Amino acid sequence: MNVHDILINPDEHVRFAAYLDELEHVADPDEVDLVSRILTDRDQTMAQSAVLRHLDRRAANLYPGPGYDGWAQTMAQATIDHPFLTQRLREWLIFRAITLTLPWRPDDLLASSNWLQLKTAAGTNTEAIEILAGAGRTKRIRNTARTGLTHHSK
C-alpha cells in the first residue's frame, strides 16, 4: 500500500497502522518525504501520533551516535509546522546531551515536558537526577529520581 492509498482510506485506525508500517520500513533517503506526506493527513492528531512514534523510535536508536545531529536537523525541517513534534526533537537533543555528558543547561531540563523529565530521572546522569529529585515537575518524577539516586549511591 502506498501513502496515497493510505491517505484515502476513511478509517483512521487503518491509516495509523499503515503509516507505522511504512515508517518502520522507509529507506533513509525517503524518510523526510514520507513524514511530510503523513503530516498532510486530514486527521492531524493521528498523523502526528504516528510521526511521534517514529521520531521516538529513530531517536532512541540514533542519539548515541554521530548520525543523530544530521537526522534531527532533517526531521526538524519536516516537522517545522508541528510544534509538539519539534518540541519532542528538541527534548531528544537535551536527553542526548544529558546522557552523553555533553553541555546542557539545568533550566532546559526543568522547563521540559514530563516525558523528558521522567526519562531523565530514570537515567544515569547523577547531576540531572539530583536536579529532578528536588525540582521535578511531578511527584512521580521526583520519586523516580530519588529512587535512581539511591541505586547510584550503592
Image (cartoon, rainbow, N blue to C red):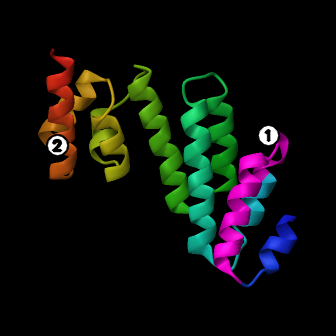
Tag 2: residue type? Arg
User: Mark number for residue 121?
Assistant: none
Tag 1: residue type? Asp
Range shown magenta: 11-32
Quarter of the picture containing the N terminus is: bottom right
Residue at point 73%, 71% (across, down): 40
Indicate yes or no whether the magenta region holds residue 106. no
- Against 27, residue 46 (above or below) is below
User: Mark number for residue 28?
Assistant: 1
The residue beneath circle 2 is: 142
Quarter of the picture containing the C terminus is: top left
Is the residue marked by circle 1 packed among few (<14), some (14-19), or many (20+) residues within 10 Å? few
Give the image location of residue 18, x and y in percent. Answer: 73, 64
**Residue 49 can be seen in this image:** yes
Distance between the Cα atoms at labels 2 and 1?
A: 38 Å
Residue at point 27%, 36% (across, down): 121
Element type at mark 2: helix
- Against 46, residue 90 (above or below) is above
**Residue 113 can be seen in this image:** no
Instruction: Classify residue 123 by image quadrant.
Output: top left
In this view, the residue farthest toward the top is 154
Q: Earlier in the sequence, mark 2 or mark 1?
A: 1
In the displayed structure image, the side of residue 49 where residue 40 appears, left or right: right
Which of these two is toward me, 8 or 99?
Answer: 8
Residue at point 40%, 19% (across, down): 101
